[in-house]
Image: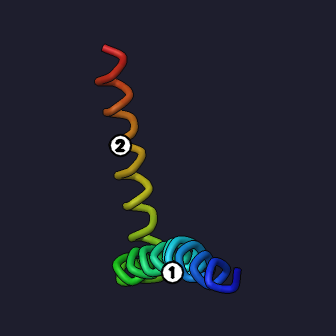
Amino acid sequence: MQALGRGLWRGVDQLAIDGFVNNAARFVRGIGNALRPSQSGGVQSYLMTMFLGLLVLTISYWLLTM
């Protein structure tokens, strides 16, 4: 019975659950590290990014509704 418990602990908890959580954390940390340089604190760059995003959304909507 203890062997079954150890096997489930290693197989399910360590590999499946901990593996998923740790990999998800690495993924999010990687995205954060990649996006960190874009956080300059300059309002002008944030406004330009919002404007470009709005422009892309508007053009996409316009193309999809034609």
Q: Which residue lies furthest to the top in this view?
A: 66
Under mark 2, the amino acid is Leu
Q: In this view, does 17 lie to the left or right of 56?
A: right
Percent position of residue 63, x then y: 29, 24
In the rendered image of this protein, does residue 50 appear above or below residue 62?
Answer: below
Q: State the image quarter where residue 7 is shown.
A: bottom right
Residue type at mark 1: give it. Asn
Q: Verify CB contact (< 8 Å) between mark 2 and mark 1.
A: no
Residue at screen point 33% across, 32% down? 60
Residue drawn at (57%, 72%) of the image: 12
Q: Which residue lies furthest to the right in this view?
A: 1
- Residue 45 locus on image (x, y percent): 39, 70
Which residue is tagged 2?
55
Q: Is residue 48 above or below residue 54?
A: below
For marks 2 and 1, give the one nearer the viewer. Answer: 1
In the image: residue 41, left or right of residue 7: left
